[in-house]
Amino acid sequence: MEWQMLLLPSYSFSIPNFMAKRINVVTMGCSKNLVDSELFLSQMAANGYGVVHDGGVEDARIVAINTCGFILDAKEESIQSILEFVEAKNQGKIDKIFVFGCLTERYKDDLISEIPEVDGFYGKFQVRKMVEDLKAEYKMSLSHQRYQTTPPHFAFLKISEGCNRHCSYCAIPRMTGKHQSIPMEQLVAQASELASKGVKELLVIAQDLSFYGMDLYKEHRLPQLIQALSEIPGIEWIKLHYAYPAGFPFDILPVMRENNHVARYLDIALQHCSDRMLKLMRRHITKDETVALIQRIREEVPGIHLRTTLLVGHPGETEEDFEELKRFVREMRFERLGVFPYSHEEDTYSGEHYQDDIPMEVKQARADEIMAIQQEIAEEINQLKIGQTFQVLIDRKEEDYFVGRTEFDSFEVDGEVLIQSQGLKIGTFCQVKITDAEAFDLYGEVI
């Protein structure tokens, strides 16, 4: 079936009296979507709505679902969430359902046709229309103000939209368009507002950090932005996520090395190492260039922890390519690594030009094999931390432990530090001596 975009119809309806000014926003997918949800929640709260994030059917009579359309699993999860709320609507438990985000940006016409119970479908960039269709006023003065859904001490900061890369497997440029940097002054204002509410850690995110500033300022501005963010009172840690290896902005490395508020942590997706696969994936980099990049980053920022993601089972990947990737993982010894089996997606270069020629069970087996190798490496690296002392940011209390993260750990994707102690306060820093280690988690005591 050919997926086409469809202009939104004009939705008009009346809001029932019971819980009429209360909305539940459900977020699917990545942290970039979470930021979009927070911006929408801020608008609704400013219009007098009671707002709930990721609530259930009992929490509000109006539901807005922010969807993900990246790969098959994410799309299926978004569809399942929509259908669950549709069932609740059919049972009279909720009154209105609105759907927005990446899935509707990609498949809006089919969704309108196939799920008519939904009261409105909106693309990723149609939040203003959704606000107005909810009989609320979109307030430009609040266009960058967030209703924070993360714990008070940390927040995500999205610094750009879209992507100019055209990797073979990725539909994101089709959904989000070309790279658009958010002006520095807006980001500093947003981060300052977050810091005034108690945020100590900024998790800086983008589809492609490496390109920040090139569209607005005709030069890389990531170093200047990170330096400006680090000078905001209250911001103690800044972590960088989703750099692209080709065209990497090396001038960020001195900032990471010399600025105590910038964590020695970098999330840089490499996807593969075989020259043959890198070419098929349209990554615009070679294996030798990748190795040189990793070596330079580690030389210029001693002690840095690198997180990367790999993709296995891409069309054309041979056993030889996979064996080369395994050797690469063993040799590079990444501190953090995730791996995903390839998903054959329409509206991508792969979907249009390649055959999905590797069975899913082979893809998954390759992913499992890479993660088994990484687990050994991660445990060896963690064992070396026993006896060392690290600054830890306390995230929560869980049974007998306070749970926190070092500067080398990002929220949800990395390991944690478990501390048996009394009287620690969530959202504060403490010095922790590591007493034991597993593959992905550390144990320690406060000193």
Image (tube, rainbow, N blue to C red):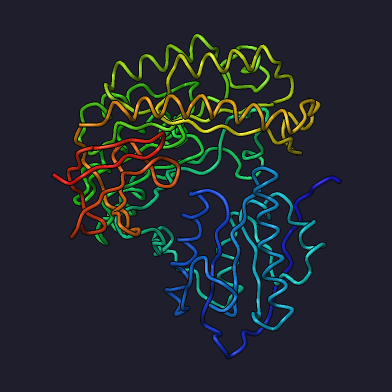
Name the residue nearer the viewer: 447 or 49. 447
Name the residue nearer the viewer: 216 or 243. 243
Q: Residue furthest top?
A: 288
Residue at 70% from the left image edge and 19% from the top image edge: 317
Q: Residue 427: horizontal and vertical position, in percent? A: 26, 56
In the image, residue 297 sits, relative to residue 415, either above or below, namely above
Q: Residue 419: horizontal and vertical position, in percent? A: 26, 49
Position of residue 237 in the picture relative to residue 105 (left or right): left
Query: Image quadrant for the C terminus?
Result: top left
Position of residue 116 in the picture relative to residue 205 (left or right): right
Q: Residue 423: horizontal and vertical position, in percent? A: 18, 60
Residue at 23% from the left image edge and 39% from the top image edge: 261
In the image, residue 237 sits, relative to residue 426, either above or below, namely above
Q: Residue 11: horizontal and vertical position, in percent? A: 70, 73
Residue at 54% from the left image edge and 67% from the top image edge: 25
Q: Quadrant of residue 219?
A: top left
